[in-house]
Each structure stands twice: as C-alpha cells, then as structure tokens.
C-alpha cells in the first residue's frame, strides 16, 4: 500500500469533521476540567455506526463458535484482501484523527474496546464472551486491563505479586494494580494475577485472568491520578482484598488452569497489538504538530521576516515531514499485512513502536521550539502534544524494553 484509497480518504474526512466539530471544542474540559471522555466516544461510535458494526461482528463470531464453524469463518474472511485492508484502515484512521487533537481519548478507547475486549474474546468461554464482551465492544460499558503493579514496572510478570488462591471451585484474589487506564471508571476489569502454587517459584507461577465488575465486595477503584499528560485518559489504582470469585470469572474456565505458559503468551500478544497501534497515534500527533508549526512559521515575524524563512526553522520543518512520511509508511505496512492475513512479529512491532514513540516526542518538542516562549504556554496546543507524546516511550513497554526485544530477536539469528 502506497497511499490512502478513495474510500479510506472519505472515512478520514468524515472522522476529521466529527473530531473538529464534537471533540476539539471540548479539549480544554478534557485536559483541565476532569471531563471523562466516554460520552463523547459513545457519540462517535453512534455517529459512524461503529457500535452496530461491532454488534454484527460479535453476533457472527458467537454463532460461528456455537456451530463449530470458526475455522470456516476465518477461511471466508481470508478471501477478500481489499475488505480486510479497508477494515484495518477503518480501525486506524480514527486513532490518527483523534490524536490530532486529543491523544488521551485513543488510550481510553483502545484499552476498553481493544485490550479488555480482546482479552475476553480471545481467552473467554462463549458464556463469558456473551456476558461481558459485547457491552465493552459497543462502549455500553467501559473496560480496563489490569497488569501493571507498583513494584513490577517493566518486569510485568516476574515482579507480579497479585495472587489467586484456589479454594475448591472458587478463588480468593488479592493484590493491587497501578497506572490502569480507565481504572477509575471501568465497569468491567480484566484482573491479571498469579495462581498460588506452593511448590513453584513465584516468578514461574501460572498467570490467570479474572473478570471483575465494579462494586464487588473487596474491589476498590481509586479516583483518577494526576499525571504529566494524556489528561483525557483517566488513570487509576485498583485494590483487590479477599475478593471471592467463582470459576465463571476465570477467563477460559477450568481449561485455563491447564494451559502451558500460564497466560503469558496471550498477554504478550496483547502487548504486540498495543505496540502496533502506537504508530497510528504518533502519526496523528506528528501530522498535527507539523500543521501547526507550518502555520506559525508563516505568520510569526522576527527581525522583519517570517521565521519560516530562516534555515534553522526550515530544518525543523523538514525533519517533521520526514517523520510524518516514515510513520505513514509504517501505518500503510500495518494495513498491507492485515490485507494479506498477516501480523508483525513481536520484534517488528517493538521496532515500530520504538521509532514511532521517539519520532512523536522529537517532533512535539521541536514544535514547542518553533513556537519559542509561546510553545511553553498551555494556550498553544503544542505544549499539550509535548506532554502527551512522552508516554508513548513508556507504556506498552519502555524504549529500553523495545530495544531488548529487538536485539534478542536479532541475536537469535
């Protein structure tokens, strides 16, 4: 894929009009007024029929699973590369357009309909998918995916202390999670923890996924945490104290207890998906920063000339355009792979995430530099992008973790 198709451009323009009309006027409230993003996101889903499309896809999947026809369903979907490309583009374009104004909304949306729903739909039984999956996919309910703990950092599995103690057909859950997107407002949370196994080293214990609902006894969701950027994406802490759950809340049910790898591979796949989406987020941020910088370079006069006439400013603008082109090509590659029924390897997704995050931060900081003192003031939105972009180098694995994943793959040879 070398350029957007006509139908994809139509989708982009329609989403852009919605964002500029319905989201841009509320950015100040989202940034500084503690306005949760969910009602606006639901409005977007309804405006473009995304909720109904999700409902139809879900019904088709469940029907196929119940009839044992999932293999045929996958085979049928593999027959139309153009349709798969359009579907992939339709999922990435809203990410790009939202990030041109409010990147935090993408994080809130992606964790709910992406990570949380995907965990339930990929690991859950049919009953669990029907019980929790559809409401999250349609944004009727908000989901959270809880893996990070206060002391674990990048060592998500090895440092995990949250536990599940089995008592007959029930489990008693304990632990705390932090930096959880949607945590303060989530209706449904996928809580990731380790099974207590007396004869197994803590680092090697099986990883299990449980579904918790808001208001369960012993399950506490904190108020939103204050943070550097992404203010439109509520982040919180979760505290689980002797929460008693049945086998019906263990994703996959009894079979999950016997799986090799203990859920690590499934979580790794989730990280891979999340890392791939960062390129689209970075493209939206870079595209908007370049647009704003060009406008300012034409209008801002210093020493009797527009600053865009000075070579140092031209160098910054040129480098922004190079980053924009590279990020767009990475997004095109993602769409092309989807069209062929393929996905990036874990190392490739890590490489893409590493470059995209660094490019977004560099461009956002250079946009602030183009604006000079004005760029440091919150009145000018490049200040927001400089704050928002930084987290791309941290979540879904820090830059250092991406480098480790890439290097390990290269050395494996």
Image (cartoon, helix red, strand yellow):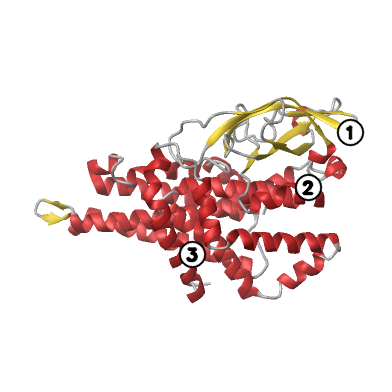
The answer to whether residue 407 is visible is: no
Characterize the local packing of mark 3: few (<14), some (14-19) or many (20 or more) Cα atoms within 10 angstroms: some
Measure the C-alpha gap from mark 1 to mark 2: 17 Å
Q: Is residue 48 above or below residue 214?
A: below
Foreground mark, 3 or 2, reads 2
Query: Helix or strand or loop: what does disc 1 sit on?
Result: loop
Q: Can residue 140 be seen in this view?
A: yes
Q: Residue at x 41, y 46 (%)?
A: 361
Mark linked to residue 399: none
Horizontal side of 337 relative to 294 (left or right) equals right
Query: Residue at (67%, 64%) from the top-left corner?
Result: 342
The disc at residue 128 is 2
Q: How many labels does the image show?
A: 3
SS class of the residue under badge 2? helix
From the viewer's side, name the closer residue of 392 and 384. Answer: 384
Residue 136 position within the rendered picture, expressed as x and y whole percent measured from the top left: 65, 49
x, y (%) of residue 103? 46, 48
Residue 202 vs residue 183, the one in the foreground = 183
Residue marked by disc 1? 169
Figure quadrant of residue 179: top right
**Residue 329: which disc?**
3
């Amino acid at each position: 894929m070398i350029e957007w198709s006509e139908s994809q451009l139509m989708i982009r323009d329609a989403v852009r009009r919605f964002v500029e009309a319905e989201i841009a006027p509320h950015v100040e409230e989202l940034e500084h007024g503690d306005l949760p993003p969910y009602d606006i996101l639901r409005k977007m889903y309804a405006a473009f029929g995304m909720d109904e499309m999700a409902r139809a896809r879900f019904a088709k999947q469940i029907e196929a699973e119940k009839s044992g026809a999932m293999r045929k369903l996958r085979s049928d979907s593999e027959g139309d590369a153009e349709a798969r490309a359009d579907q992939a583009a339709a999922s990435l374009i809203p990410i790009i357009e939202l990030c041109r104004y409010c990147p935090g909304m993408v994080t809130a949306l992606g964790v709910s309909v992406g990570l949380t729903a995907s965990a339930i739909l990929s690991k859950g039984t049919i009953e669990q998918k029907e019980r929790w999956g559809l409401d999250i996919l349609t944004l009727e309910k908000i989901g959270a995916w809880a893996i990070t703990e206060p002391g674990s950092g990048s060592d998500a599995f090895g440092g995990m202390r949250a536990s599940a103690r089995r008592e007959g057909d029930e489990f008693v859950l304990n632990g705390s999670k932090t930096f959880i997107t949607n945590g303060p407002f989530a209706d449904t949370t996928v809580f990731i923890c380790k099974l207590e196994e007396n004869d197994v080293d803590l680092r090697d214990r099986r990883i299990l996924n449980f579904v918790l609902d808001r208001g369960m006894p012993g399950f506490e969701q904190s108020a939103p945490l204050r943070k550097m950027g992404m203010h439109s994406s509520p982040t919180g802490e979760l505290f689980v104290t002797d929460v008693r759950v049945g086998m019906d809340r263990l994703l996959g049910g009894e079979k999950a207890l016997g799986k090799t790898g203990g859920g690590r591979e499934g979580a790794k796949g989730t990280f891979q998906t999340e890392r791939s989406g960062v390129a689209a987020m970075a493209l939206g941020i870079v595209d908007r920063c370049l647009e704003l910088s060009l406008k300012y370079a034409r209008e801002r006069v210093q020493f009797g000339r527009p600053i865009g006439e000075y070579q140092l400013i031209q160098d910054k603008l040129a480098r922004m355009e190079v980053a924009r082109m590279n990020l767009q090509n990475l997004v095109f590659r993602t769409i092309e792979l989807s069209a062929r029924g393929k996905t990036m390897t874990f190392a490739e997704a890590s490489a893409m995430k590493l470059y995209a995050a660094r490019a977004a931060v560099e461009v956002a900081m250079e946009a602030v530099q183009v604006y000079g003192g004005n760029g440091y003031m919150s009145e000018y939105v490049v200040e927001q992008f400089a704050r928002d972009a930084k987290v791309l180098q941290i979540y879904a694995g820090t830059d250092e973790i991406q480098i480790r994943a890439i290097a390990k793959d290269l050395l494996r040879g």
